[in-house]
Image (tube, rainbow, N blue to C red):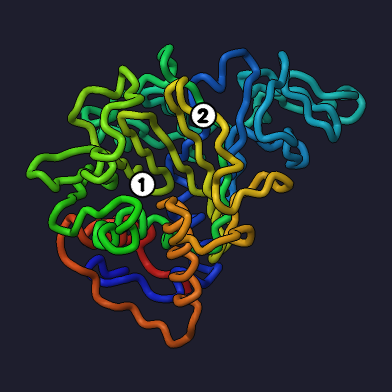
Amino acid sequence: MMQASHSLPRTAYVDDKWLSHEQRGLFSGSWCLVGTTGDFKNPGDYRLVEIGGYSLVAILCRHRGTTLFDDDNGNTGGAIVCPYHRWTYGLDGGLRGVPDKATCFPDLDRAGLGLKPAGLGVFREFVFVNADPTASFEDWIAPIRDRSWPHDLYASDVKEAVPLTYDLKCNWKVFVENAIDGYHLAYLHEKTLGGPAPDQNIWDRAGDHMIWFATEEGIRHRLPKKIRDENGSIGTISSAAQAGYGGVYYLFPLTLVVPTPYGLSVSSLRPRSSNRTRLEYRHWVGPWQSRDDRKHVPGYNKETDLVSSDNWTRHPLETGDFQTEDVWICEKVQRGLESPAYEPGPLSTGPGAEDPIRWFHASLGRRLGDTPD
């Protein structure tokens, strides 16, 4: 079994066998963000997500396994038609029509060949799916249900900005561990976030999830003091004005939600290999804020519509962008992990330091059990 009190072994970050192990033992039964309720306004609307080797919502044809959709989102119309042999499914997943059935499939039992179901859950405006149709969404979301953010994404003073996709050259766990590490805030992000120091921030455990607060002035706050002092109350959206909610919510294993008085963002991790991850970033802002800042995002390339370190034109620490700082350090960590000389080091103690990484490893251990062969 993996030891929760120690760092994971090097192979957990650099060996594709680990990723296959995670796909089978973790992702195939995990809740994954697929969109918001506003993405499904009309019958037949769909969005695709691939996780754990499964295509969810982009459902496979039961005849020869063809993926049914080419686009990441769209509308099927009144039925789902496979482009290969035009097998046709209703929006409930049932097999409705088979061309030349009498000639080619005279004894076909359509009732047993409907599209396979998946688990579905909705929390606030967010829609989650799970490849396991028997998985309990309520058990997963219950630890934060009464501790969530107050933001109303469909309020009149909230607008969705243009989404971003980051191409990260690191293992998905490297990004998660950095995101829940309170020890680095005062150092890597000294100029952008200004800390807080390890004894001035805290992560709360909520089942396998975690919630972050700044505690610089002896009370829990959703923002570091430096950000509050610089931004004040200008641009506060109505539903987010009330205090009491956290500044970061980590929803195990692949989702990060960052609510602030000025908007809300959600990051969804999509592991692609042992050292490559896509991060899909959606954010909602007040109508007085820009809805398209792509040209100002360090590393954005309009040709690929991706944000990548390949496109940086100045050093990440000179950009004034803490997300860029995080990408930079995660990719540096990944390069270090790939050295044969790497050995796991000690983790600092404290819920505002690196204890959350221990909790994360413990959650992985409960789900994954033995390490891969």
Q: Is residue 253 visible?
A: yes
The answer to which of 88 and 301 lies nearer the viewer is 301
User: Splitting the image into 4 quarters, where does residue 93 fall?
Assistant: top right
Disc 1 crowd, CA 10 A, few/some/many (<14, 14-19, 20+): many
Q: Is residue 212 left or right of residue 285?
A: left
Badge 2 amino acid: Ser
The residue that mark 1 highlights is 252
Q: Secondary structure at mark 1?
A: loop
Residue 117 lies in what quarter of the image?
A: top right
Residue underneath mark 2 = 290
226 to 109, vertically: above or below: below
Q: Nearer the viewer, residue 206 or 324?
A: 324
Circle 2 SS class? loop
- Please give left or right for residue 104 compared with residue 269 in the image: right
Q: Residue at x 68, y 18 (%)?
A: 90
Q: Position of residue 132 (x, y in %)?
A: 47, 39
Residue 222 sits in quarter: top left
Q: Which mark is residue 191?
A: none
Residue at 36% of width from left, 59% of height from top? 178
Of marks 1 and 2, which one's residue comes earlier in the chain?
1
Amino acid identity at mark 1: Phe
